[in-house]
Amino acid sequence: SGDQDLGTGLHVVAWRFSPTTQTFTLTVDGVHSVSSRQPALGPLTNMPLIVGAASLLPTGMFKGDISELVIVQHEVTNEQVQYFNEYADNTWNGLFTSTPQGPCIKYNGQPSPNTTRCNDGNPSTVGDHCSAGACVGTTPRPGSPKELSPYGWYYASEQDVVTDQIGGVSTWYDRGTGRQDLLSSYVGRPPFDADGWNDAKPTLKFTGSQVVKRQGWVG
């Protein structure tokens, strides 16, 4: 979901990796953000457990307070995370677990960038992302590619793209399970046309000088 400043309040944070789906899930105060599909993890060697830094050098030093740290050796469900949130709220008091802002609202109340990925909690929707401070997804029609559980699925619509000031597409959201959004640098962005063909069907226009891509594609 990208960087998010949580301010100076009290929070419950859960970080999980699922070997089944090969995705990371970051849960802040009960709101889940799921990563794109990651490479499979190989065998893990014995290593130190470090709290407060990203490495032994040390680098990536942590700034903040920790009152409770839990490490679990198996997959944890969303329901189990919710149970822990309730436990933490009753134990530590004053947490934000009962009124989560989610990844689409910053700690200062301002909306997160529209490129921020989120989970609207509805399994029927696809392409969930932040829009004007809310997590939104799209419900596809019956018979759509969703029924094939595609790894990558890119659909031209105003809800599925982020455009710049001149209409060039900087992000094309992935509706598939891989959540591998396609990106474009400032030069060579294909324009989004809401009436691209048949005078009514949206499309991204490629004229031989535009590209969208995904670095480090995993699939």
Image: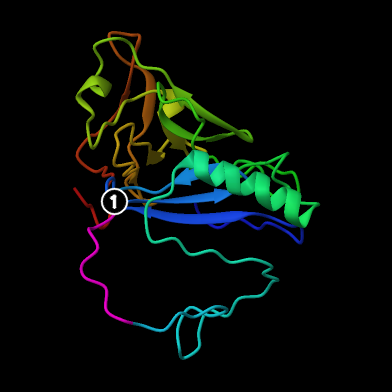
Residue 83 lies, in percent from the top left, at 59, 43
161 lies above or below 50: above
Side of 199 relative to 89 (left or right):
left
Q: Is residue 116 visible?
A: no
Report the residue marked by disc 1: 22
Q: Residue at x 39, y 49 (%)?
A: 35
Q: Amino acid at mark 1?
A: Gln
SS for dot 1:
loop
Side of 111 relative to 150 (left or right):
right
Side of 168 relative to 152 (left or right):
right
Dominant SS type (magenta): loop
Location of residue 66 by image quarter: bottom right
Q: Residue at x 38, y 51 (%)?
A: 75
How would you rate the neighbour count of disc 1 (Cα within 10 Å): few for under 14, some for 14-19, many for 20 or more?
some
| Residue segment shown in magenta | 38-46
Outermost right residue: 94
126 lies above or below 61: above
Residue 50 lies, in percent from the top left, at 49, 80
| In-front residue for pair 1/98 | 98
Q: Residue at x 46, y 36 (%)?
A: 163
| In-front residue for pair 182/25 | 25
